[in-house]
Amino acid sequence: MRLNPFDPDSIRVTEGGGGGFPGGGGGKIGCGTLIIALIGAVVFGVDPGQMIGAIESTQQQAGPAQEEPGSSDARTICARNAYATEACNALDSLNKTWEPLFRKANIPFEQPTLHFFRGGTRTGCGAAQSAMGPFYCPADQGIYIDTSFYDELAQQLGAKGDFARYYVIAHEYGHHVQKLVGLADQVNSAQRQNSSQANALQVRMELQADCYAGVWAGQHRDLVESGDMEEGLTAASAIGDDTLQRNAGQQVSPESFTHGSSEQRMHWLKTGLETGNEDSCDTFADLKR
């Protein structure tokens, strides 16, 4: 995908962390933690049941974010490596795509902040480490990523290409959209009221974020190159719950899914790509009948 160079004055970017997992804290990491635990199982050989249990045991109410030492100059940060530059280009494009849609809907818009880190970091949702993979923290409206994840994505999960990497950022941005429109808070409330449906509701959230990622690309068809859709669909398939569970040597357990099957993830990403319309991403439609 041939994205335009980012404007350093129009994006929010920080960097910090490194040298291991910060002590203290705890807290609830934002959307994506459980599936990232499964990715960690595939990549690092960790038992996903143990990893998920460890994450869930720290899901307390999050406190304020603690600043990491590091730079906040976008031009400098985004030039650290090719992956960072790509992510900043994507962030700028995502902002410029979604802000007009919010303005048209008369909904207040606020840009997320893209946080690059190495090893471990502190967030508004608690402590995080690279093994969790990229995630969105609704408490501080931040997208967090250690770009070394992209090497693991390609080498361990077979999801190669720039569009696969853009899909990751665009998916997390989709969670920011859900936060701004109030859907994330509604779903969190429903999950607390009916814990037996928590995973099923989370799956719908994640599939919608996949669709929103596709919508972004679908609105820039002139920049999409041959093979991009295949790269995106390969990535979506590689991180489907059923595929990750099989690759981790686990029995496929649909009731434990938190992001959806490979087939579901590909379907919703493709829906967004083909329509370029956020209205096509209502993964909750059948619940409204």
Image: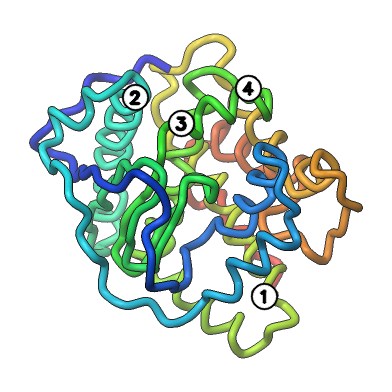
Q: CA distance from mark 3 to mark 2?
A: 13 Å
**Amino acid type at mark 2:** Glu
**Amino acid type at mark 1:** Ala
Sequence order check, earlier mark of 1 and 3: 3
Sequence order check, earlier mark of 1 and 4: 4
Sequence order check, earlier mark of 3 and 2: 2
Sequence order check, earlier mark of 1 and 2: 2
Q: Residue at x 37, y 15 (%)?
A: 2
Sequence order check, earlier mark of 2 and 4: 2
What is the x, y in percent for residue 281? 56, 51
Residue that label 3 marks: 148
**Amino acid type at mark 4:** Gln
Q: Is residue 207 above or below residue 54?
A: above
Rendered image quadrant of residue 196: bottom right
Residue that label 1 marks: 198
Residue that label 2 marks: 86
Residue that label 4 marks: 155
What is the x, y in percent for residue 266? 69, 37
Dot 4 lies on which element? helix
Q: CB atoms at circles 3 and 2 under 8 Å apart?
A: no
Q: CA distance from mark 1 to mark 3?
A: 31 Å
